Amino acid sequence: MIDFIKNIFLYSDSKPLIFTQLYFWVFFGVVLTFYSFIYKNKAVRNAYLFFVSLFFYYKTSGFFFAILLFSTLADFIIGKRIFKAKALNSKKWLIASSVFINLLLLGYFKYSYFLVENINELFGTAFVPINYFANIANLLTNSHFEVDKILLPVGISFYTFQTISYSIDVYREKIKPVDNILDFGFYVSFFPQLVAGPIVRASEFIPQLYQEYKLTKAQFGHAIFLILNGLIKKMVIGDFIAVNFIDRVFDNPLSYSGFENLMALYGYSLQVYADFSGYTDIAIGIALLMGFHLPLNFNSPYKAENVGDFWKRWHISLSTWLKDYLYIPMGGNRNGTWFTYISLTFILSFIVLLSGKLFLAYIFIGIIIILVILARLSNSFRHQINTNINLMMTMLIGGLWHGASWQFVIWGGLNGFGLVIYKYWKHISPFKNKNNWISHLLGVLITFNFITFTRIWFRGESMEVTSNILHQISQQFSFSIIPDVIIGFKSVFIYMLIGYIIHWLPSSIKEIYRGWFVKSNLFIKAFIVIIVVFILYQTRTAEIQPFIYFQF
């Protein structure tokens, strides 16, 4: 009995609380039961959901919830001080402190090993990363956390961006600061989207804290549809093709033919979409059942006609965050600012550390001097350089947001390069004034294949893996074995085909079956839920398959 209670209330790294576990849905059922008694009292409702979210995060990430609490408290205090400050310089110092604190936390947990390893290589030092947070916890609680190992708190990349957006929105006077720490804590930690997004803007979510609960019959149907849709994406399609094919190929690409490596890439494009959009579908559906609206995070991204369109459809909450809080402050497509050059210095320094080669710093300095001279000679050239730097910096930082490795630098750089190329191509494209299905299909195919190609670096765990995949595709590709491979992995390819067909279905067709489900009576909805649960049970994998974006 004691062990049973411990399993319910204590954190276990082997049993995290995630959407694909039965335990989560029991937890959510209990949450909804108590919620039904207190939802009319907004203050109690917000406090209740804050503490529930803290428990959820504890069950997902252990005592890292203390980091979440620190970030919450820091930005709550800073937000109030920004609002009360009279002098503009005081406001600027406060907003800078918010950004610094949040990025310091994110950088410490996410980039410490990278920085220490490359500093040691560059300068011959012997620094060792120390988990100071674990050290403090051991002193305060007489616990025994490992001090020589720094683990990444789940979701830290998401909630730090949320708290930064809050401070900036208060500074820009888009919102007033939250008066109650429990209300603010609820905004930061709302459990459906806490660990993998979507990233929720303070200006969009905080007004909802003070609105009356409302859930129409149509919204209820839409919420259930989203939850079922997300679970099917993740567990039926994403996990199946990952466990039975994709993971095997990426774990040892040299053991598979060029065709198998190529199909694993196309499979991964489907998997990462099914996995990530599946999570956000579930998160949006759960939030909607409790009366809260989360932003759309995916809009059929593989229907995009160009790279720019793709990034308006993929991980929309991150793309728009980077645009509004990074790209536009750097000058956007208008000009460069001091922020541009600070960001450029940061990125180039990061690349030097990443390479472990000090001579790269001198090369970068030389290139910058040449560009500055050319910019002085031509206003047009200066404008093009500045705006392209803004674009590249945004995508490179977006890449590094996912992790500190050459893999993500190259992935972000390739997407930035694709955006720059498209910016010029759209002015000379022979299809720019044509609106027919051939030009549309061509644009979709080129964009989809380019995005899939860049994912070699996103999925590959090392440069050796990516080089092996590229080698197999370019050097070990044989058309004669394709029929045998298709037969050998027929189930995987059938699932992939079904997944892509559903994705590329016209929105009007999808709206027909979504609308039918929303309008159906409660008994039909219950019957479909039972059928879906049965299918999920039949297709589930033996081991827990965490959502891909938990690692970021």
Image: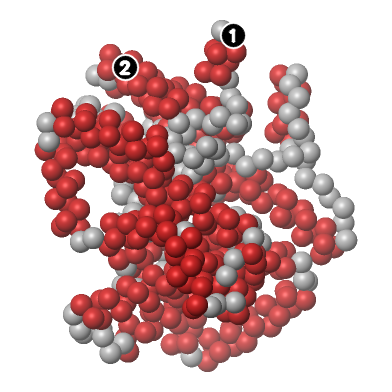
- The answer to whether residue 433 is above or below residue 307 is below
* Residue, far bottom: 377
**Residue 308 image point, x, y percent:** 36, 70
For the N terminus, the image quarter is: top right
**Residue 202 image point, x, y percent:** 37, 42
**Residue 337 image point, x, y percent:** 49, 69
Q: Earlier in the sequence, mark 1 or mark 2?
A: 1
Residue at left 77%, top 71%?
357
Q: Nearer the viewer, residue 215 or 303?
A: 303
Q: Nearer the viewer, residue 296 or 25?
A: 25
Amino acid type, residue under disc 2 in the picture: Thr
Describe residue 188's horizontal placement relative to residue 257 as left or right. Answer: left
Q: Categorize mark 1 by other alpha carbons within 10 Å: few (<14), some (14-19), many (20+).
A: few
Kindly identify which residue carries mark 1. 2
Indicate the quadrant where residue 141 lies. Answer: top right
**Residue 375 image point, x, y percent:** 53, 86
Q: Which mark is residue 33?
A: 2
- The answer to whether residue 233 is above or below residue 194 is below
